[in-house]
Structures are given as structure tokens and as C-alpha cells.
Amino acid sequence: MLTSTMMRQAPINGGFRMDKYWVWCGSVIKGEDDRYHMFASRWSMEYPMHPGWVFRSEIVRASSDSREGPYAFEEVVLPARGAAYWDGQATHNPSIVRYKDQYVLFYTGITYPFDVTPDSIAGEDERYFTAQAHKRIGIATATSVNGPWVRWDEPLLQTRPQAFDSFLTSNPAPCVSDDGSVLLLYKARAYVGNRMGPMTIGAAKANRIDGPYERVSDPIFSVDTGGEIEDPFVWQGEDGVYHMIAKDMTGKICGEKHAGMYANSNNGLKWDIVQGHKAYSRHVVWENGVSQVMGSFERPFLLIENGKATCLFAATGMGPGGFSRNSITWNMSVPLG
């Protein structure tokens, strides 16, 4: 079980950042070259952080000789490819896994039928909600961490009319078992009238990575069930039990707003929340001994090596707190021990 007391001093120059870009959503894997590779979201600081991401995010790859970094930019992995594609305008929320000799990149794709310029973004207007309504989950595959990546022309997880995920599917959190079967948690919203409703967390299972995925009929976490969470990360122990950490949206579960809650499950569909347990904290101690409460600490990702969680990665930023109030952002690394 991950606990915030396992967080060690964070390297000041660790993680991944880029000048002139917002950086978010870090997911790390050790490649066939024995180096560490981070798949991340970025978008130009010509656009506001929010809602610039929904229009202009693209998934990139960075690499490092050490797990903590610093990571150096290598390439754009999933660029824009045209509004006619389901993921043609933006890609976001990467989550990289490896099964046998194949790398599988789960991600959120977005499209919309209009042009966007830095001067034309006006907050959460109708274009923002149109783009949100086109968020879907898909995968890209490659036999090398360096690509080339094969992108699918259809989403892996569509929306469903009259269901809790009728408006969007996003934020994939996959867990691939040794037999190739997949548990996939994801963020969902339903239509409420003509608008998007409250955030929920859904679950789906598949016998193969490429599906088909069978989803549960009701969300596994929602405001109604007391599960006000976002950005789950899931892994499976040697005993087959599923473990999950996620951002506690209000602090009612773990005791600190936007810190990490923890839950476990025998089947991935019914989860037991450990009330009062804090998996990670926004309170970070840097390697120079300085303590800091980060303005954001989101999209948690655990690097698990030989069955042990060795490093926690989180999208973070400088600011007064909150996703859209950051002045700069990057993906930071926190060694665990």
C-alpha cells in the first residue's frame, strides 16, 4: 500500500519541463534501451493553460538515463492530424504500458469542427464544451518505445447514449494482466440536458488490449457514492488484488484536498476505499531541504519495477492552487522508499 510517508526528497531538476510549453500528464516506462521514457502532454504557452489543453495538447516523448530525470524532449508522438479524425485536433492523458513485445499507449483524443487561435480562446465557451463532448479514449501501438506508432481510426471506448458516459470518455487508467486481459478505469461525464454533467469514474474489462471492452452499467465512483476522485492510477499485486490511487477532489477521503486517496479491489469493479489513508501529499520536500505545498499535484503515476513502486510522478505547477491558476507547469518526480 502506498503511503505519503514513502515520499523522499524530490530532485530540484528532476522530471520533465519545457520552455514555452505547458507540460502535464507524465507516464513513464523503461524502454528496450534500458533508459527511461516519459510520455507527456504539452501545449504552447501562447494559449492559456486552461482551456488551451483541450484545443492544442499533443503527446510527446522525453527520455532520461535515470528514473527521476531530468527528462529531455525527444519527439512529438501523436500530433494533430486533422478534424476528420476522432483524435485529429488534440491528444492528451497518455498512459504507456508494455505487453510482451508491444508498447501500447492509451490516451484521450479530441476533435472539433472549427479553427482556434491564441486570441480566440474565451474560457469555457460553447467551443470548449463542443471539444469536451468529442473526447474519447483510444490506443496507439509500436514495437519500439521510439515508434513508429500506429494510430487507430476509431476510439477504443466510445460514449453510450443514456449512460453515465454519454458525454465523454477520457483519462484512461489501464492495468494489463500477465494473460493480456485489461482492467480500464476512466473518467466519464453524462449529458444533463444539453450540458455535461458531474464527473464520474467508470470501469471496463477486456480479454485483449484491443478489446472489445465490456463496461459496468453504473459508475464505480461518483459524488453520490462519496467517491469524489479524479485521475486514478491502477496496478495489480502478485496476489491478483487491484490497487488504486487517485486525486481526492475535496479531501473528504484522505484528509487533504487534491492529495492521494487509496482503494483496493478483488475484481476491479467493486472497490473498498481506505478512509483516512493518504497515498501521497501536495506537501513536497526538495533535495535542498525546502518544504513546499505545490499549487497542483495531479495525474499521479507510479513507476513500478520488479513489483515495487520506485518513483511517483505528478503534473505540478507554481501558483496559488488549482488546475487553471498555474504560472508554469511540469511533470515532477518523487523517489519512493
Image: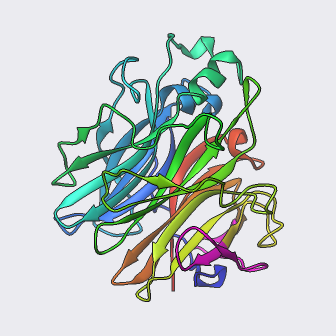
Q: Is residue 203 above or below residue 3?
A: above
Q: What count of labels does the image hold? A: 0
Q: Residue at x 35, y 42 (%)?
A: 60
In the image: residue 288, left or right of residue 29: right
Q: Choose between 29 and 118: the one closer to the eye.
A: 29
In the image: residue 111, left or right of residue 258: left
Q: Quadrant of residue 161?
A: top right
**Magenta region:** 262-289
| Any part of residue 79 in sight | yes
What x and y, as percent, mark residue 235?
46, 73
What kind of colouring is applied to the model shown? rainbow
What x and y, as percent, mark residue 182?
39, 63
Q: Is residue 305 above or below residue 246?
A: below
Q: Quadrant of the N terminus?
A: bottom right
Q: Choose between 300 and 9: the one closer to the eye.
A: 300
Q: Is residue 116 above or below residue 307?
A: above
The magenta stretch spans residue 286: yes
Q: Residue at x 77, y 73 (%)?
A: 254
The magenta stretch spans residue 201: no
What x and y, as percent, mark residue 90?
45, 30
What x and y, as percent, mark residue 180?
29, 67
Instruction: Tell me which secondary structure the magenta stretch mostly adopts.
Output: loop
| Any part of residue 290 in sight | no
Q: Residue at x 22, y 42 (%)?
A: 149
